[in-house]
Amino acid sequence: MSTETVERPIAEGMPEAAPPPETIRLKPTGGFGRVLSPRELWRYRDLAFQIAARDVTVRYRQTALGAVWAILQPVGFMVVFSLFFGRVAGVSSDGLPYALFSLAALVPWTYFANTLLLGSESLVANSSLVAKIYFPRIFMPAGVLAAGFLDLGISLVILFAIVLIYGFVPSVAVLFLPVLVLIMVAAGLGVTAGLSAVNVRYRDVRYVIPFAIQMWLFATPIAYPSSLISEPWRTLSAVNPMVGVVEGFRWATLGTGDAPWELIGVSAISALVLLIAGLAYFDRVERSFADFI
Amino acid sequence: MSAVAIETKGLGKSYELGLSRRGYGTLRESMVEAAKGSLGRLTGRHRKRSEGDTLWALRDLSLTIERGEVVGLIGHNGAGKSTLLKILSRIVEPTAGWADVTGRTGSLLEVGTGFHPELTGRENIFLNGAILGMRRAEIRQRFDEIVAFAEIERFLDTPVKRYSSGMSVRLAFAVAAHLEPEILLVDEVLAVGDAAFQRKSLGKMNEVAEAGRTVIFVSHNLAILQALCQRGVLLERGRMVADAPVGEAIDGYLRTLERAAGGDLLERTDRDSRAYDESLISRVEVRDAEGGLADTVVAGRAAKIVVEVTEVLPMMECRLTILNTLGHPVATLDSEVPAPVDVRDSSLGPRIECDIDALPLLPGRYRIDVLLKGKRQIQDGLQAAAFFDVEPGVLADRPTPISGADGDVVLPHSWRLPS
């Protein structure tokens, strides 16, 4: 719905203190420009905060292990990967201890995979809200990404603890982590926004996502180093934004090796494209969510 | 001071039929549809989507509501009342025309939307307040008032899942009632809680209305509308048919109800949306058991309500709600609550009969809402399926009061008086 403001003469005798109420014109719209309206997002900022807070509180209250899950998932994968890929298959880990090598990649991956899974369901899971209340719908997938930060933070702390235990000292490259997280969030928001919107129309998405996440896991150099791939395919593989994020995380947290600038660069561009495409699609179909959900 | 709060011009909302029943589809259905479409074009048998495939839930509505007006929306199920509220509260987008809304809008389309069972009462107040459009500071400011109104002080830090249903409804309403928008849209939310709380809610709504806020009400309870609103807008099949002082609009609505009950019930489209439609209500009649005019019964005498249906299904059940002229329910007769006197008779044919020994109703006009069940599913539902008049009579040897009596029912009773 468009939110153009129509000037309307204010009745005389209005107390001056009260700001003139604004008029919103509701009419059929086409094209873009709903979801990316900063004015709307700002107006509903309290709701955004409440939704993210709710997601965090509920998750930690409902699960017996609470914060432990944030650690258990990446560490569990680390153990399994170390055994099968590190020991049995003898996959190269660029000279690093395999456990550390995989954990540094699993920490961002766990955030990405979990938010993808929850985020793509977020609109459908909150269908009663979507059908009954107006708010910028983007808050639903975006709230999932925001709520995931707590888990990501906890698992990062564990990662650094293990890094130190192994005797590695993070270099100044660690300052680059926020940029990598930003790339990951941009890609994640683009993909989850797009998928959550498709999910409103086609519930097939729910069945595709878990499968797609597993495929994506193996398409990303988590259990293996990207150095196994020969150029130019290695650089090209970074159109999967998680390639740049994961290799970047290894470099930034372990403080060894050369910065994978070409991977990070390609992934950043790819994440930006995904973000724009996802939000643009979301924006187009947002107006009809309540008709279909 | 007079300023326009809401102005609409040619406002309309249409739905593609076929999608209306179940909104979402699957990818496969869409692919099959697309394939059919192109195949149809190839073979020249492609059917163009015509106007007939489109349902206008609301059509060509032009309306101006001044600031401070309290307006009641009246109409059958599916007349477009909820669609209008949904457009004004920005949940759905109109398909045609426009609406200008001036001022902050709050909508109460369903009490308790967005409550989360795992969160405590305190957390839910903040979440629900934000959902309804309140700023955090505002909620904090009114927090004590909300808690006191809901009467849940002792359970503030208990998760809402442990609340009784009465408590959570009270809390939800309390949050909503303390929302102070310039325009308030209310859809059938006053019928919650026990009688005392309902009275309190109604009082709160009255306060809101008198505080000079613009309010649009939807309710099937015409007495509430009459008490709260000055102006009534009557909608019928998506179109506005009357915009008048609320009393006139209600009269108009009652006339359309009677017209609908008088016609062929099978042709009515305002049926229960949850229904399975395997068996439909075709005719409803109220008779004095001792003969006499159809749809006229005498207080204190035996009456029979007959519901004719199109199909006999296994495990048929029927619920009749008798309402007074203002839409206030007077009694519910429900076959799902069994009694030894009930009979299942295979020779009865496609009809359901309900016998009342001595009709305990005051003289006046009443209507019946019918809900039909079969195979453990709702099969059909019709509001105002029949009207009937109660004539003065005698109940338990006492004549019914002819005029001046309050209420709707007469009770068989006796007195002991000093002499």
Image (cartoon, rainbow, N blue to C red):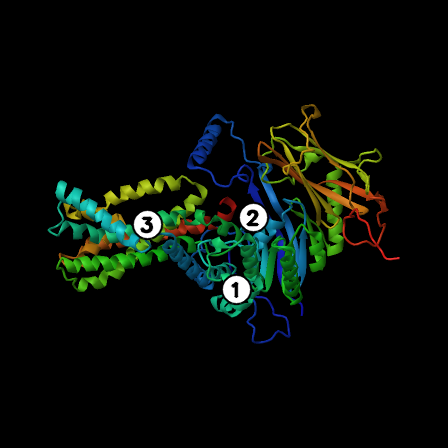
**In the current view of this chain or complex, which residue is farthest to the right?**
B419
Q: Which mark is residue B153?
A: 1
Alpha carbon separation for disc pair 1 and 2? 46 Å
| Left or right of B316 on screen, residue A60 | left
Mark 1 vs mark 2: which is more N-terminal?
2
Q: Chain of mark 2?
A: B
Position in image of residue A98 (x %, y %): 15, 49
Q: Amino acid at mark 1?
A: Glu
Observer able to see residue B98: yes
**In the current view of this chain or complex, which residue is farthest to the left?**
A95
| Left or right of A153 on screen, residue B21 | right
Q: Amino acid at mark 2?
A: Thr
Position in image of residue A87 (x %, y %): 13, 43
Task: Determine the secondary structure under disc 1.
Answer: helix
Q: Which residue is mark 2?
A: B95
Task: Determine the secondary structure under disc 3.
Answer: helix
Q: Chain of mark 3?
A: A
Position in image of residue A138 (x %, y %): 42, 54
Alpha carbon separation for disc pair 2 and 3? 37 Å
